[in-house]
């Protein structure tokens, strides 16, 4: 279910024009996962810089020398660029770097007519960071050079709730037991679990992510946007399963 969500988010974002509102609201809630996280910040910061160059500066082609963030990481530049290429953020040809399929899509939906301090731009930036996060998760899993347990822990919470809701309406609350099971499945340590919970509760910047609150007995209450996201994702998962049976 984790992999289905990740793949379906990217397929839908790239193929549908414009991307559906339920998806955009969902990815906004994922934008925080890699920020300031030492094991993935190099990839995320470089991806963000490249996206900015192609989207804001409207560059058509660059070289690795134009990317400043790779100079502030201990990771080898080729390794970072390979991951960005697998994540469809860039495309390399004859030593030049071009926008990948994902960045091309981001350029198509580039915001126009708003100042940077408006709520509309805030939403668009969250969408940008959210979709970059999802595509980097997929690329990391594919590369097998680093397993993003933190990110998979978040997706596992959603997966647990989708699968445990059965045929009923998607549950608004997920029990402490199933949250802990989700973290265990994704191999997230206790310290990191507490940090993720604090991040989702808004202790980092005052804004909750995915959830509205955690009850006194440890249940997480999902936001309306996430309940809707999980409901649609469950429908798509079942449709894909039926397609495979027919095949």
Image: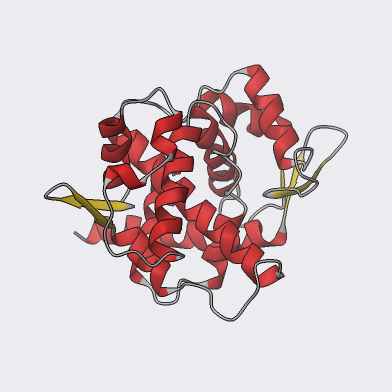
Relative depth, front residue between 71 and 90: 71
Q: Residue at x 71, y 41 (%)?
A: 200
Above or below: residue 208 compared with residue 152: below
Quarter assignment of residue 147:
top left
Quarter assignment of residue 223:
bottom right
Q: Residue at x 71, y 69 (%)?
A: 119
Residue found farthest to the left = 94
Residue found farthest to the bottom = 113
Relative depth, front residue between 183 and 95: 95
Above or below: residue 160 compared with residue 126: above
Query: In this rendering, does residue 158 appear at all?
Result: yes
Q: Quadrant of the C terminus?
A: bottom left
Residue found farthest to the front = 65
**Which coloring applies here?**
secondary structure
In percent of width and height, residue 224 lies at 71, 61
Residue found farthest to the right = 216
In percent of width and height, residue 73 lies at 43, 27
Q: Quadrant of the N terminus?
A: top left
In percent of width and height, residue 120 lies at 65, 71
Relative depth, front residue between 182 and 194: 194
Query: In this rendering, does residue 229 appear at all?
Result: no
Above or below: residue 159 compared with residue 217: below
């Amino acid at each position: 279910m984790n992999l289905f969500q990740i793949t379906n988010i990217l397929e839908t974002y790239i193929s549908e024009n414009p991307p559906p509102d339920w998806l955009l609201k969902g990815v906004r809630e994922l934008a925080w996962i890699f920020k300031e996280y030492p094991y993935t910040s190099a990839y995320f910061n470089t991806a963000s810089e490249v996206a900015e160059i192609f989207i804001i500066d409207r560059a058509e082609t660059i070289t690795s020398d134009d990317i400043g963030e790779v100079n502030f990481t201990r990771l080898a530049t080729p390794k970072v660029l390979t991951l960005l290429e697998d994540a469809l953020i860039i495309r390399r040809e004859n030593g030049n770097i071009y926008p990948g399929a994902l960045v091309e899509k981001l350029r198509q939906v580039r915001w126009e007519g708003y100042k940077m301090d408006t709520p509309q731009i805030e939403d668009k930036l969250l969408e940008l960071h959210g979709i970059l996060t999802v595509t980097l998760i997929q690329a990391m899993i594919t590369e097998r050079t680093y397993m993003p347990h933190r990110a998979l822990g978040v997706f596992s919470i959603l997966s647990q709730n989708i699968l445990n809701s059965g045929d009923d309406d998607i549950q608004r609350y997920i029990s402490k037991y199933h949250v802990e099971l989700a973290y265990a499945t994704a191999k997230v340590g206790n310290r990191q679990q507490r940090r993720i919970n604090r991040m989702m509760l808004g202790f980092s910047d005052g804004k909750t992510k995915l959830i509205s609150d955690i009850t006194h007995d440890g249940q997480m209450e999902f936001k309306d946007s996430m309940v809707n996201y999980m409901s649609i994702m469950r429908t798509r998962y079942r449709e894909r399963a039926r397609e495979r049976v027919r095949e």
